[in-house]
Image (cartoon, rainbow, N blue to C red):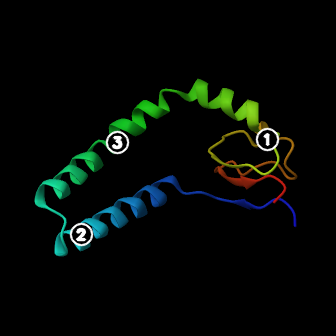
Amino acid sequence: MGIKVGVASTKSFTSQLTILTLMTLLIGRRRDLSYEEGHEILRALEKVPEQIREILKQAGKVREFAEKYCHSDHFLWAHRSQRPSMWPHLSGGCSARGGIEHAKI
């Protein structure tokens, strides 16, 4: 097998996780999840946009991490790059739309 490359859609992925969380909350409330516990989950979900903004402020640290591990075998990472040459060790580079790559799986 060779390198597998898939295009990741951050908005779709985040939306799917949000919907799954809300469905889980609904199922939990129909069983034995208390109102307070459910409300706590919703408050945590409301914090996600700000948490994402905080993570995005750390782009330099993320780049350092990527540079440290980009040549590792058996490693899975997700990225968004405007420069296909950012990952030159991968055959064919990477999609300008971003993607998920597996090294030697």
Which residue, given by chain and number where applicable, does mark 1 sit on?
87
> 13 left or right of 38?
right
**Element under disc 2:** helix
Q: Earlier in the sequence, mark 2 or mark 1?
A: 2
**Element under disc 1:** loop
Amino acid residing under circle 3:
Pro
| Residue depicted at x 72% and y 52% | 95
> 93 left or right of 12?
right
> 8 left or right of 21?
right
Q: Is residue 17 above or below residue 98?
A: below
Q: Earlier in the sequence, mark 1 or mark 3?
A: 3
Which residue, given by chain and number where applicable, does mark 2 sit on?
28
Amino acid residing under circle 1:
Trp
Q: Is residue 87 above or below residue 45?
A: above
Which residue, given by chain and number where applicable, does mark 3 sit on?
49
Residue 51: x and y in percent read 38, 37
Amino acid residing under circle 2:
Gly
Give how far apart the Cα atoms at labels 1 and 3 are: 28 Å
Quadrant of the image containing the C terminus: bottom right
Give how far apart the Cα atoms at labels 2 and 3 are: 24 Å
| Residue depicted at x 48% and y 59% | 13
**Element under disc 3:** helix
